[in-house]
Image (cartoon, rainbow, N blue to C red):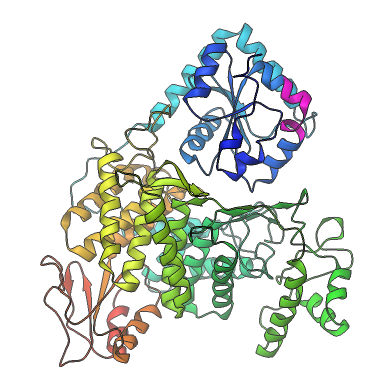
Amino acid sequence: MTTSEGRNRLAEETSPYLLQHADNPVHWWPWGEAALAEARRLDRPILLSVGYAACHWCHVMAHESFENADVAQVMNELFINIKVDREERPDIDAIYQQALALLGQQGGWPLTMFCTSGGEPFWGGTYFPQPAKYGRPSFTDILHGVADAWRDKKDAIEQNRTALLEALRERARSQALEAIPGTVLLSPALFAQAATRLAQEVDMVWGGFGQAPKFPSPYVFERLWRSWLAGGRREAKLFDAVTVTLDRMCQGGIYDHLGGGFARYATDSEWLIPHFEKMLYDNAQLIDLLTLVWQETKSPLYRSRIAETCDWVLREMIAANGAFAATYDADSEGEEGKFYVWRGKEIDAVLSAEDSLFFRRIYDVRDEGNWEHGNNILHRNRRPPLLSDEDEARLAALRQKLKAVRDKRVWPGWDDKVLADWNGLMIAALANAGAVFGRPDWRDAALRAFDAIWRDMRGDDGRLLHSWRNGTARHRGTLDDHANMARAALALFETDGESRHLEAARLLVEALDAHFHDTSGGGYFFTAADAADVIVRRKDAHDNAVPSGNGTMVGVLARLWALTGEERFRDRAEEVVAAFAGEVERNFFPLMTLMNNAELLQALTEVVIIGSPVDPATGALTAVVHSRSLPNKVMRSLSPDAVLPPGHPAAGKGLVDGRPAAYVCREMACSAPVVEPTELAAALEQRV
């Protein structure tokens, strides 16, 4: 075995996930041409293993197989082994997850894919146990079987490779419709039909969709909420589907009642048992949705969860450069959830007898445990949700005592890499929530994160890089990076009016148009035209754990059209909708972000407030806008001497008799000015 073969090459990587595997006896390579060249030189298949730092089953497979010298020896003798952090390389992960789906298998992590030396997949799976269990063959049996097929069944390997590659390329081809600018490609009736259909699938007792597992799916519930508003607030089932789900999640074990923040998903139907990892992107989306629904309901529960989650982000999720870190692990000390769960006697040891009895009753803490091995997951879904203000204050003090004790435990692993796309989601959520709830500290944190990414994660050509850690930015940016950061820039612009944020959004859109745009089929590819290390360039509008980049871009372009008056932004937004409209007609469920932003494009309402930011009358008008659930709103605050571009419908408008004034603009035409908050409220209610 040569020196070039016989070593693990992950120690020089920046990804915490890859560094977790830097001491494995497996001779891991990072993804790149060097690894592919080595596979060609030795005529070996590639074993591609994809995971992420907070993934529980990734840790299990690592312990069983990748830390096992005997398993590693088999891997090293038979394969070129490549390790990928799916959060650092979502473009790579998405391709091979799609290949796994084409093989008829359920996707997920860890992803284990076997490929040719060109990176072309021919077979794969997810978690493989070592030794055999759960009705699955052992990982070493899989390895020997694949290696035997590589040696003895070249025709079968080639047949699989060819079929998968062609299917991947077919999926990547455009299914665009011919679109005429100005044509409504997705009708309000379709939005309403989709919401009605989705509401039928909601568990109206526990919320969420179906049984276990349950995911928050915030963009889906945004669709239901939008349709409830658009329908004149008449469809009670739509309202109930959203609020029952949010109530149950906010009171369930999926929420961290001591530290704030939501876990990735629940493994049961009642939101009790979380998959304990905390992801930046889930919490960003839930802050957004809860804020939108709170603006209508004024629910104290939602307000509390928003505040606790935002405060958790500022307390625990700030990376070294001021942007936001990616995740917290599900595991600590080798056990899933150990950091978060409690035994009854542990609560008794921290609180007085009277306080412990009270706390345990509210949070369902039992001597025998409400979960496995005598452990309790704190939740409030088994008790009446409404307590007196006095009782809530008492509980808050008790939670702080317990949190102080919990903070002394061994913490879960923290993945402190900064991802541009996830940061874009959180920046936008904090900027909006900070404005709505009068929390400048949230908005300031959003601004610092945006500035950090703009400073540290842009290449010489102005394009974003995807990941940053320890002073190093790596990996070319994706569609999602540019789309989410453009959305973040516009969210900041709507709250501070600083022209640099509007300009940043323009620059990001220009980068997408230059390097990602599909000039023949419309829409944007996930990877840039100069991406040399992917076997296909995907283009779709499917939401996954995060909103789709193409769906997000419809909203970005619609907002730029409203804020600048430039028709080219509206035309491009309509083109993106057109590129996927046929797919929406066939299967709308994975296309909620596209639908939500298509509605924004069609029903956009811009509110222009002109007045000094220190004038209380300006603040009163602004407060009216922030107090209402207006998902199709674009807001612009201007000083009295500001000048709008000539194409903007509010160009030339200003104060009224020296008083701050608001203009409500729809379809590029503005209402008469209003100066009283009650008048503005009435104008906004004319159409949501």
Compared to residue 44, the image places residue 598 above or below, namely below
Q: Residue at x 49, y 39 (%)?
A: 89
The answer to if 452 sits in the magenta stretch is no
Side of 564 relative to 239 (left or right): left
The answer to if 71 sits in the magenta stretch is yes
Residue 117 seen by the camera = no
Which of the two residues, 342 or 107, is positioned nearer the viewer here? 342
Q: Residue at x 32, y 84 (%)?
A: 681
Compared to residue 320, the image places residue 296 above or below, namely below
Q: Which residues are magenta?
A: 64-73
Residue 69 seen by the camera = yes
Q: Residue at x 44, y 28 (%)?
A: 168
Q: Which quadrant is home to the N terminus?
A: top right
Expressed as whole percent of the image width and height from the top left, the position of residue 575 reads 25, 47
Q: Residue at x 50, y 21 (%)?
A: 36
Compared to residue 18, the image places residue 336 above or below, namely below
* Most common secondary structure along the magenta stretch: helix
Expressed as whole percent of the image width and height from the top left, the position of residue 670 reads 17, 75
